[in-house]
Amino acid sequence: MIDFSGKRVLVTGAASGIGLAQARAFQKAGAEVIGVDLQDLAEPGFQLELCDVSDEGAVQRLSEKLGRVDILLNTAGVLDDYSDMSSTSFAYWKKILETNLNSVFLMTQAFLPLMKAEKSGVIINMASVAGLVAGGGGLAYTASKHAIVGFTKQLALDEAKSGIQVLAIAPGAIDTPMNAKDFLENDGEMAKWVARETPAGRWAKPEEVAELSLFLASPAASYMSGAVVPIDGGWTIK
């Protein structure tokens, strides 16, 4: 196991799914973990701060309270029910982008200067296969994840000389509460179809994404600046 003792790790979307798995994995690896979410957890096992990461004022207050972090995991996000243009209102469009994209900008804007002062830091953004190809979500979700890919690459280029490493993870089918609808509706036909269409033949667990996060945040991956790493069972190689 990679040792993250002495590192402060901040994870958004830490109350469930991939964010919760990341928080637990980094804590197990010795890090001081701070989770951020709108939802509370009875016994998270790590420090949990309630914050709307799409709200500029709330994020600024959070950064003033917490100070420097070594690793920032921008994981918070929501799906859009595969909505197409005809079923996506402008209000819904803005809601999806505020949650998925604006939060990444605001959290990075708040904590990047503290990293630059130390000339060290790792930022890992949660993209998606929907940030690489069409069909992984609806219009707003796909647009938000494509934007995260572009944001990650440009930020990595801009900040490489400052000692900041910026990466993104592009998950495919991950069995999380956010995707529970695929398993519950119509006898889980959507989940079965996704598994059949995935070359690996299955959904992944959030812990698998968390393990990838540990590697990417470690010194072993320090030459991977700007990389967008799929973890999708082969979905994007078809």
Image (tube, grey):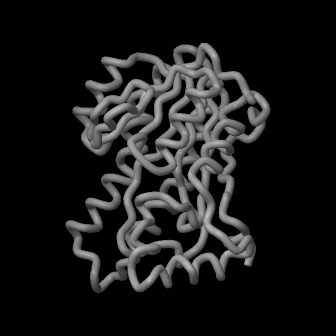
Looking at the rendered structure, the number of numbered marks drawn on it comes to 0
Q: Quadrant of the C terminus?
A: bottom right
Viewport quadrant of the N terminus: top right
Residue 66: percent from the left, percent from the top? 37, 19
71 in relation to 147, above or below? above
Seen in the picture, residue 62 relative to 202 is either above or below; the reply is above
Relative to 158, 237 lies left or right: right
Q: Residue 125: percent from the left, percent from the top?
A: 53, 45
Q: Is residue 159 visible?
A: yes
In x, y percent, where is residue 176?
Answer: 48, 58
7 horizontally vs 100: left or right: right
Residue at (44, 35) in percent of width and height:
108
Residue 115 seen by the camera? no
Near-viewer residue (66 or 209) = 209
In depth, the one of 137 and 154 nearer the eye is: 137
| Residue 146 percent across, percent down from the top left | 51, 62
- At 32% from the left and 34% from the top, the residue drawn is 42
Q: Residue at x 66, y 33 (%)?
A: 217
Residue 193 location, quadrant: bottom right
**Residue at the (62%, 49%) spot, across then down:** 209
Q: In this image, 14 relative to 30: left or right? A: left
Residue 93 position by quadrant? bottom left
58 and 109: which is toward the camera: 58
